[in-house]
């Protein structure tokens, strides 16, 4: 027997915390945490749309 579905849902966060996603993913995550206004959020959204096309499927699914 392996982990139940609830356990499996935690695996992506473990991989993220272990630094297994791309450097680009962590850069975007840091930039998003620094957003402090509606204008800043709209600017980030524009940048994110451009960046998602350049990321791996796994990383883009984690963000989207």
Image (spheres, rainbow, N blue to C red):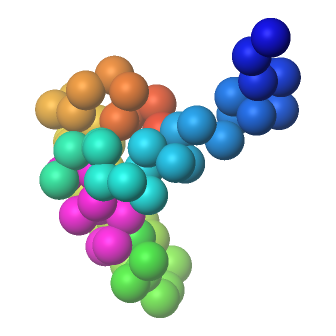
Magenta-span inclusion, residue 25:
yes
Which quadrant of the view contains residue 29?
A: bottom left
| In this view, 53 is above or below 23 | above
| In this view, 61 is above or below 28 | above
Residue displayed at 66% across by 41% down: 10
Which one is in front, 52 or 13? 13
Which one is in front, 40 or 4? 4
Q: How many labels does the image show?
A: 0
Question: Which quarter shows the N terminus?
Answer: top right
Q: What stretch is highlighted in magenta?
A: 24-31
Which one is in front, 59 or 37? 59
Magenta-span inclusion, residue 32:
no
Residue found farthest to the bottom: 36
Residue displayed at 42% across by 50% down: 16
Residue displayed at 52% across by 48% down: 14
Residue found farthest to the front: 1
In the displayed structure image, the side of residue 9 where residue 56 appears, left or right:
left
In the displayed structure image, the side of residue 36 where residue 28 appears, left or right:
left
Which one is in front, 3 or 37? 3
Q: Is residue 64 visible?
A: no
Return the x and y of residue 61 as percentages of the image width and height. Answer: 46, 31
Q: Is residue 62 visible?
A: yes
Residue found farthest to the top: 1
- The rendered magenta stretch, by its main secondary structure, is classed as helix
Return the x and y of residue 28 as percentages of the image width and height. Answer: 29, 61
Which quadrant of the view contains residue 39?
A: bottom left
Residue displayed at 38% across by 84% down: 34
Return the x and y of residue 40 as percentages of the image width and height. Answer: 38, 78
Which quadrant of the view contains residue 41?
A: bottom left
């Amino acid at each position: 027997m392996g982990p139940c579905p609830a356990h499996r849902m935690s695996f992506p966060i473990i991989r993220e915390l272990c630094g297994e996603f791309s450097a680009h993913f962590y850069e975007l995550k840091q930039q998003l945490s620094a957003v402090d206004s509606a204008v800043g959020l709209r600017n980030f959204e524009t940048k994110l749309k451009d960046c998602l096309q350049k990321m791996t499927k796994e990383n883009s699914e984690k963000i989207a």
